[in-house]
């Protein structure tokens, strides 16, 4: 096969008058002479100049938007504006035709809603080229961060019989015939006839299994797909998404907060250092979008300023109790502008409250700690009751501008008696989690961890506003296309 050069390399090249071959997809074709060609290696196109007098008319007709072509010719300095090089083609070959009457991507601006309907083709736009290059960089940076610190990467199961969150909103995994489901004597589904001989689901978290590994390796992390059968059609929720979940033995809540802050700063800096073109493009895109909004709805920061803001500020740390005090006396609460008013300790904070703390009150990322036990999971370490006798847990949530909760975590409850009592209170069957409780029976140790929803991270770094635009093929209620 002919050796091809990548467009990203040729755009920086000064090796003029050398013969090069490029292969890519036609973005535009003007005057039967100028092809804007993109091969996905960068957002930039290279201009291929044809001598149309010496090419068959049938070939020229097949050079249409979306067609895949190969072009060979000399790399020369460009006389046109906005480009330093171009290719004077001596030969062109059509690798794959594209019917211009049917190809849905045309050289114009398309709405994000429309592009979601053709998610199999939206990668070919500049916006999604940039988004998924940034997504790649962030995933690589996550692995690099943990590898540099000696963490072991664990692949925890996608199919599980446990519900880590106790929420019950899980997708069932079964091979049973729905039209002829086996039943027990009392009429319930007989899962002993199923593939795994028990009820199983798609995982909502790798945390519980991650804790088992941390009790041997000291520090591990997971990075894999997770699933929530939550009937939610918001711009911040998906049914299938990716989670990063580190677990660290001999660590407390302070260690956990520091690890999370270090990780966030590391991966954001990596994206800024390695995705300059993509982030500049997304920064401009967001600024143009902002201009269409009323003045009071416009962002205080540009995208690049927002990312730099997270690097240059230490995250503000405060307790849930302090946050409630601030929110109760805040202007939006006093003037009843919050959708969910804060009137008492124990309320579950909503996104509007989290964003107020970050964007209006502190103007920096915030780490909230020590939440009421009643609104948190069974595995979180119980603090001693406060002065008013209220029970809190050593939990933490990291809140970011524009997003709200980015990370949720805690110090884990390592005391067997406290853990089993809490499971009884929350009706979590201990016999199903005997293996988890064993880590508290045999060499239990203080440990902590957290979960980061990867798509929320990508949403924040790219400045996109809908989580369905930062995962290749989004899964959400009533939709499993592609």
Image (tube, rainbow, N blue to C red):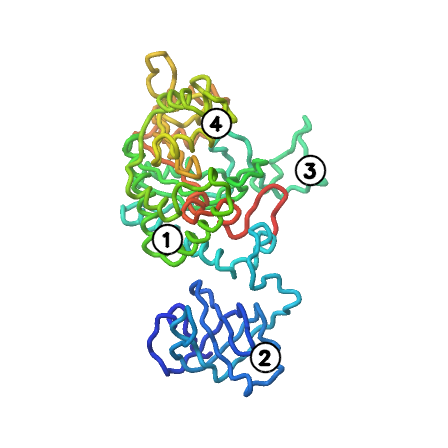
Determine whether, in the image, residue 217 is placed left or right of residue 59.
left
First-in-chain label (4 vs 3): 3
Residue on which disc 3 sits: 181
Is residue 428 or residue 2 the one in the foreground?
Answer: 2
Q: Residue at x 44, y 26 (%)?
A: 376
Residue annotated with mark 4: 431
Residue 53 image point, x, y percent: 55, 87
Q: Do the residues under discs 1 and 4 have CB atoms within 8 angstroms?
A: no
Q: Nearer the viewer, residue 404 or 424?
A: 404
Mark 3 or 2 closer to N-term?
A: 2
Q: Quadrant of residue 20?
A: bottom left
Question: How far is mark 3 from mark 2, CA to CA?
Answer: 60 Å
Label 2: which residue?
60
Quadrant into which the C terminus falls = bottom right
Q: Nearer the viewer, mark 1 or mark 3?
A: 1
Within-10-Å neighbours for mark 2: few <14, some 14–19, many 20+? some
Q: Decide if residue 462 is in sight here.
A: yes
């Amino acid at each position: 096969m002919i050796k091809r050069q990548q467009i990203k390399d040729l755009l920086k090249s000064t090796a003029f008058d050398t013969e090069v071959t490029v292969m890519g997809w036609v973005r535009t074709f003007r005057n039967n002479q100028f092809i804007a060609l993109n091969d996905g290696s960068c957002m930039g196109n290279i201009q291929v100049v044809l001598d149309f007098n010496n090419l068959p008319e049938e070939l020229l007709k097949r050079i249409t938007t979306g067609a895949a072509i190969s072009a060979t010719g000399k790399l020369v300095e460009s006389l046109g504006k906005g480009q330093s090089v171009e290719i004077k083609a001596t030969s062109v070959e059509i690798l794959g035709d594209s019917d211009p009457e049917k190809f849905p991507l045309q050289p114009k601006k398309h709405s994000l809603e429309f592009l979601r309907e053709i998610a199999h083709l939206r990668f070919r736009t500049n916006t999604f080229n940039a988004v998924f290059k940034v997504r790649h960089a962030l995933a690589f940076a996550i692995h690099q961060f943990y590898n540099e610190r000696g963490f072991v990467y664990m692949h925890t199961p996608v199919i599980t019989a446990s519900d880590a969150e106790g929420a019950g909103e899980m997708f069932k995994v079964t091979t049973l015939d729905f039209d002829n489901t086996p039943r027990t004597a009392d009429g319930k589904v007989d899962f002993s006839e199923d593939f795994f001989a028990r009820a199983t689901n798609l995982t909502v978290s790798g945390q519980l299994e991650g804790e088992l590994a941390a009790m041997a390796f000291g520090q591990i992390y997971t990075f894999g797909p997770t699933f929530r059968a939550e009937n939610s059609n918001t711009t911040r929720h998906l049914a299938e998404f990716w989670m990063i979940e580190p677990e660290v033995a001999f660590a407390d809540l302070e260690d956990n907060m520091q690890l999370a802050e270090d990780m966030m700063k590391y991966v954001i800096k990596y994206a800024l250092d390695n995705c300059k073109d993509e982030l500049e493009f997304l920064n401009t895109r967001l600024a143009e979008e902002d201009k269409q909004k009323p003045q009071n709805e416009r962002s205080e920061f540009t995208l690049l300023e927002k990312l730099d803001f997270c690097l240059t500020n230490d995250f503000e740390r405060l307790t849930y109790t302090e946050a409630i005090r601030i929110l109760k006396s805040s202007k939006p609460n006093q003037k009843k502008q919050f959708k969910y008013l804060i009137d008492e300790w124990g309320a579950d904070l909503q996104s509007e409250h989290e964003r107020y703390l970050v964007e209006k009150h502190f103007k920096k990322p915030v780490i909230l700690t020590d939440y009421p036990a009643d609104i948190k999971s069974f595995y979180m370490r119980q603090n001693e009751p406060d002065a008013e006798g209220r029970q809190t847990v050593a939990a933490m949530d990291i809140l970011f501008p524009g997003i709200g909760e980015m990370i949720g975590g805690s110090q884990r409850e390592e005391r067997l008696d406290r853990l089993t009592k809490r499971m009884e209170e929350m009706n979590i069957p201990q016999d199903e989690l005997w293996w988890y409780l064993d880590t508290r029976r045999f060499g239990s140790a203080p440990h902590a961890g957290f979960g980061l929803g990867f798509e929320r991270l990508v949403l924040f770094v790219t400045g996109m506003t809908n989580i369905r635009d930062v995962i290749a093929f989004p899964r959400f209620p009533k939709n499993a296309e592609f």
